[in-house]
Image: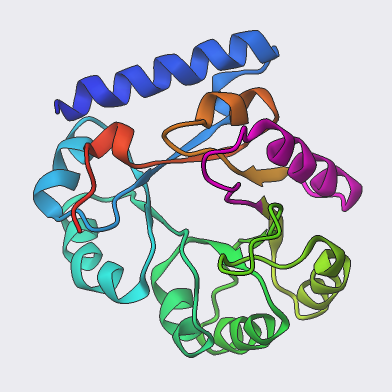
Amino acid sequence: MNAALALSEIHDRIARACRIARREPDEITLVAISKTHGAEAIEPLLAAGHRVFGENRVQEAQAKWPALRAAWPGVELHLVGSLQSNKAQDAAELFDCIHSLDRPSLVTALAKAFDRTGRRVPCFVQVDVGEEPQKGGCAVSDLPGLLEAARGADIPVIGLMCVPPADIEPAPFFALLDKLARDNGLAGLSMGMSGDFETAVMLGATHVRVGSALFGTRNT
């Protein structure tokens, strides 16, 4: 897969979705999900000018991104996977945005980590819109309380994130997340992946998380 061509195609598809939704493409941040991919797969995208990447695991990101960042200035790194409380300080030191704040214990851990590091990393609260206990995310009913706790702990919450159930039309779940964000005074919406990011853009996404459409089949 040619990285520059793949990147251009994704931007074209975002632009088309924006035209339909009467939005501007610069309202959308494309987060290239580089989890399980090594430097040899990531560097062609960097060379093509892309700078916003997402990783699922703190340990994997620690292993590969310091060297990449040294070679390619201006990288913005997002944590899109579940975050264990005992990794909160590592995440605070490494990432520029966290998409998976989903429980009170993580609010506590991140607040302490932000105080220690002097960094207050912007966060999305992950919501379990599909009521799937096996996935991360707070229950819809628990969202107001979690937001109150996060704001009380001086955590900069910039929006909501979701991963809709697989193999079901995602639009109703994206619409629900958009409503929840508006009801709670939040502008950011992290939603949409390789198979459904255009739908997400048309329903208000500000951040789309695209992996396989940029990198090809994921390594295991």
Query: Quick check: is 162 in the magenta stretch?
Result: yes
Relative to 163, 46 lies left or right: left
Quarter of the figure with the C terminus: bottom left
Magenta span of residues: 161-186
> Which residue: 9% across, 48% down?
40
Image mark count? 0
Residue found at x 69% / y 12%: 22
Its colouring scheme is rainbow
Q: Which of the two residues, 124 or 94, is positioned nearer the viewer here?
A: 124
Which residue is found at the position 59% from the left and 25% from the top?
199
Q: Residue at x 46, y 64 (%)?
A: 81
- Residue 151 is situated, as x and y percent measured from the top left of the image, at 80, 71
Q: Nearer the viewer, residue 159 or 180?
A: 180
Q: Is residue 34 left or right of residue 101?
A: left
Spot occupied by residue 217 in the image (x, y as percentages of width and height) = 22, 41
Residue reaching furthest to the left: 40
